[in-house]
Amino acid sequence: MKSLEDLKRMREAALKKVEMREGGKDYRVVVGMATCGIAAGARPVLNRLVEDTAEHDYNCVVTQTGCIGMCVYEPIVEVYDKDGGHTTYVHVDPEKASKILAEHIGKGIIVDEYTVDAAKKEQGL
């Protein structure tokens, strides 16, 4: 930090991160970060979601939770809308996370091929 302007920029960046985690948005994006999620690669997914949300100013809060209960499908990302509906995305990697934000949060279009229902159909369930 070299100047008051640097301090202001740091403060704005910190406030933006807090806002993303605390609410006031139309969507809540939740990443399963239990041991199974982390082992499957959830940390890079969470990082990408936070970075992309800040960069593109998506209308969502990014947060994390413990075990979602479907370890075989980790990393899992759930998107909740303001009306209480939610979509569960499975086997998410950072690239899929970016597409989920761009399509689901940015345009309101569910990325069907990444959902738990699509994964179950592939498995014949």
Image (cartoon, helix red, strand yellow):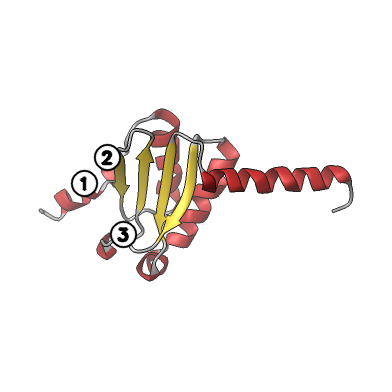
Q: In the image, what residue occupies the spot 20% across and 47% down?
A: 117
- Determine which of the numbered discs, if any, sits on residue 112 in the image: 2
What is the number of the mark on residue 2?
none
Residue 18 shown left or right of residue 96 in the figure: right
Q: Report the number of discs.
A: 3
Image coordinates of residue 38 in percent, x first then y, are: 42, 66
* 2 or 3: mark nearer the eye: 3
In the image, taking residue 16 as reference, residue 12 lies left or right, namely: right
Q: Quadrant of residue 73?
A: bottom left
- Circle 1 residue: 118
Q: What residue lies at 56% left-to-right and 48% top-to-bottom?
A: 51
Secondary structure under tag 3 reads loop
What amino acid type is highlighted by mark number 3?
A: Ile
Please give left or right for residue 57 compared with residue 83 in the image: right
Who comes first in sequence, dot 2 or dot 3?
A: 3
Q: Which residue is mark 3?
A: 68
Q: Amino acid at mark 2?
A: Asp
Task: Calculate the distance from the C-alpha at mark 1 to the C-alpha at mark 2.
Answer: 7 Å
* Percent x, y of residue 71: 28, 65
The picture places residue 2, in percent across and down from the top left corner, at 89, 51
Is disc 1 surrounded by few (<14), some (14 to 19) or many (20+) residues within 10 Å? Answer: some
Asked whether 84 or 31 is in front, the reply is 84
